[in-house]
Image (tube, helix red, strand yellow):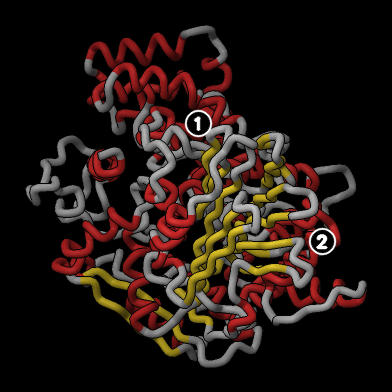
């Protein structure tokens, strides 16, 4: 797990690579890779690669990056982990490739030499990497199927630049920092910036499951090699669904989950675990024990403000840890620490987000224990239907499809409600758009996951910025673009949307910046393309009484009943108004029924975060 960056001066009129820019960009990401730093510039000064290292696999100097092949043809800079690298190594050695290290980076280089860009189909892991091919004079940039690891790029039609962070690219000094209206509008709509946009007009994120190739003739568009929607469509094809009996279903689910956990435990350093009071992390802990992992250290954070309340996960997490014999640590975050860390959180937040505060403190606690790698239960809700959206969205669509089909009726009702002020009497400001949007999956998803609705934004940002942002972003189309090829069932459609939008743009990205700010690698066994294929082949899980029962039943030793029955509360940090405080330290008042004493008031926090991001 690392920070990567590079420059390819691909146009004949471009200046040679600026070593100082390359170093400045690289070292802006020092927290991502505190164990070492590397730099490589080609003999002709047209290509430069940088790397900050967090040593996890092959801790020796032979695993340092940028890494080159012995013949000098290929050079790579790589962020992430390839969990099946040992199997790939064996296959490549049988073809005559010679290895000089035990690192997964060298497996990447030889795999590229063997298969070219098609190598991405053979990789199981979380990754963002660049490989320079001297013979072809081209650069390959690739990102993992789910988008666990980020990579951003900027192209000024002479130079192609990339890095693991937007702020690192800007720090290099060669990328214009003009704000992007689409990124600002997208953040206010969803609480995170939807890929491929960023808050900087000149910088784009390489979409998940894509690669692109840069040649001396120019930059190619992103090529998609993996689609979550396609995985569900394949599983829905006639004759594809597994006809396993109920007892076989449980065993095959366990086998798939245990296989993913085993792959995600590959490391040359101890692997710990984030542990909440919920099913996801508890089941993974049980599976880690089933995978014969001993001496597991688990970390739970609890906020001083939550003591004795439903949000306090510490007591039940401790019970789960005892069940599986883990060495457990509960870290209390005081109100004073919460306030003191706020500026650091905003500085580490590479792109604005309304979330991530909890992961910041959990990662901080893990590093205090000396851990460099932890396992997280992120992804269980998306895979097994744990969110309310799996029940709400199909119900809304079924009820509202017919009235929503009447031309302009929904928009007229919404405008009348807003103009009359009646929308303020509704349970949520978003409810005014129920008739307008609720009849389609894309519209219903916007209502369910939206932070602000498009018609509310005129109060928050300049009119010109709003118009340009909406025109570029096309919010409803952006949601619809996450679905093709569209699954045929409601469950698969919602699962695709939640995985491709909310999890990818917010949860995974927040996990990346918040953990890497502490030099911590977070692994997510439930966010795995191979696991997805195996689980969806078994048919859709229930979404009513026990939506995650398959996951809960997977460990050989059952989870405590209290963890299985516990109502879902989410992993939140306390508000106490100070999280939404103005820069002068004075808290804003929170008006209306949307505020809560528990959890971050997302709307006020969003305005604070955006103001900081574009300052």
Q: Nearer the viewer, residue 591 or 439?
A: 591
Q: Give the quarter of the figure containing the N terminus.
A: bottom right
Q: Give the quarter of the figure containing the C terminus.
A: top left
Give residue 423's position: percent from left, percent from top.
27, 22
Label 1: which secondary element: helix
Label 2: which secondary element: helix
Give residue 282's position: percent from left, percent from top.
50, 74
Q: Quadrant of residue 542?
A: bottom right
Q: Nearer the viewer, mark 1 or mark 2?
A: 2
**Residue 107 vertical position relative to residue 487 in the rendered view, above or below:** below
The answer to whether one can see residue 417 in this image is yes
**Residue 257 vertical position relative to residue 445 in the rendered view, above or below:** below
Give residue 174's position: percent from left, percent from top.
43, 42
Q: Which residue is mark 1?
A: 444
Q: Which mark is residue 113?
A: 2
Q: Is residue 398 left or right of residue 225?
A: left
Residue for point 72% across, 47% down: 138
């Amino acid at each position: 797990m690392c920070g990567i960056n590079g420059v390819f001066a691909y146009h004949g009129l471009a200046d040679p690579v600026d070593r100082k820019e390359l170093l400045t960009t690289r070292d802006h990401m020092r927290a991502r890779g505190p164990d070492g730093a590397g730099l490589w510039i080609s003999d002709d000064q047209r290509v430069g690669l940088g790397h900050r290292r967090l040593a996890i696999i092959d801790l020796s100097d032979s695993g340092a990056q940028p890494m080159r092949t012995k013949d000098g043809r290929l050079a790579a800079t790589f962020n992430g982990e390839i969990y099946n690298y040992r199997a790939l190594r064996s296959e490549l050695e049988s073809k005559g490739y010679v290895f000089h290290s035990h690192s997964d980076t060298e497996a990447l280089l030889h795999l590229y030499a063997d298969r070219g860009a098609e190598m991405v189909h053979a990789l199981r892991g979380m990754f963002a990497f660049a490989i320079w091919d001297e013979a072809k004079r081209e650069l390959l940039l690739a990102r993992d199927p789910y988008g666990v690891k980020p990579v951003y790029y900027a192209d000024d039609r002479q130079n192609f630049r990339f890095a693991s962070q937007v702020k690192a690219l800007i720090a290099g000094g060669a990328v214009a920092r003009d704000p992007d209206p689409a990124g600002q509008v997208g953040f206010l709509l969803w609480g995170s910036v939807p890929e491929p946009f960023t808050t900087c007009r000149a910088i784009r994120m390489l979409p998940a499951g894509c690669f692109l190739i840069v040649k001396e003739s120019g930059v190619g568009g992103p090529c998609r090699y993996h689609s979550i929607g396609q995985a569900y469509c394949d599983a829905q094809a006639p004759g594809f669904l597994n006809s396993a009996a109920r007892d076989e279903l449980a065993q095959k689910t366990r086998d798939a989950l245990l296989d993913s956990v085993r792959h995600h435990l590959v490391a040359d350093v101890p692997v710990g675990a984030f542990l909440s009071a919920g099913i996801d992390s508890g089941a993974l802990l049980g599976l880690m024990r089933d995978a014969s992992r001993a001496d597991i250290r688990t970390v739970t954070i609890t906020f001083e403000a939550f003591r004795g309340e439903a949000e306090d996960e510490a007591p039940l997490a401790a019970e789960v840890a005892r069940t599986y014999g883990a060495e457990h640590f509960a870290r209390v975050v005081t109100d004073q620490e919460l306030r003191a860390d706020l500026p650091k959180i905003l500085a580490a937040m590479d792109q604005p987000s309304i979330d991530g505060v909890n992961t910041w403190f959990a990662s901080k606690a893990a590093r205090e224990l000396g851990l460099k790698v932890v396992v997280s239960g992120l992804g269980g809700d998306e895979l097994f239907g744990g969110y309310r959206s799996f029940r709400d969205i199909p119900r809304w669509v079924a009820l509202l499809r017919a009235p929503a089909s009447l031309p302009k009726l929904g928009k007229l009702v919404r405008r009348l409600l807003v103009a009359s002020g009646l929308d303020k009497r509704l349970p949520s400001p978003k409810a005014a758009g129920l008739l307008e949007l609720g009849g389609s999956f894309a519209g219903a998803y916007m209502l369910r996951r939206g932070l602000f609705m498009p018609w509310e934004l005129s109060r928050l940002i300049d009119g010109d910025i709003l118009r340009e942002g909406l025109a570029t972003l096309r919010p409803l189309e952006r949601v619809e673009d996450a679905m093709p090829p569209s699954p045929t069932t409601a469950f698969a459609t919602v699962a695709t949307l939640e995985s491709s939008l909310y999890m990818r743009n917010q949860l995974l990205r927040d996990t990346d910046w918040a953990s890497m700010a502490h030099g911590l690698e977070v692994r997510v066994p439930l966010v795995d393309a191979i696991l997805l294929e195996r689980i969806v082949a078994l048919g859709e899980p229930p979404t009513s009484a026990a939506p995650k029962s398959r996951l809960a039943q997977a460990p050989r030793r059952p989870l405590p009943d209290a963890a299985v029955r516990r109502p879902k509360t989410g992993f939140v940090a306390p508000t106490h108004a100070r999280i939404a405080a103005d820069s002068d330290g004075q808290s804003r008042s929170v008006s209306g029924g949307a505020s809560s004493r528990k959890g971050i008031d997302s709307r006020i926090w969003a305005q604070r975060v955006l103001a900081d991001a574009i300052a």
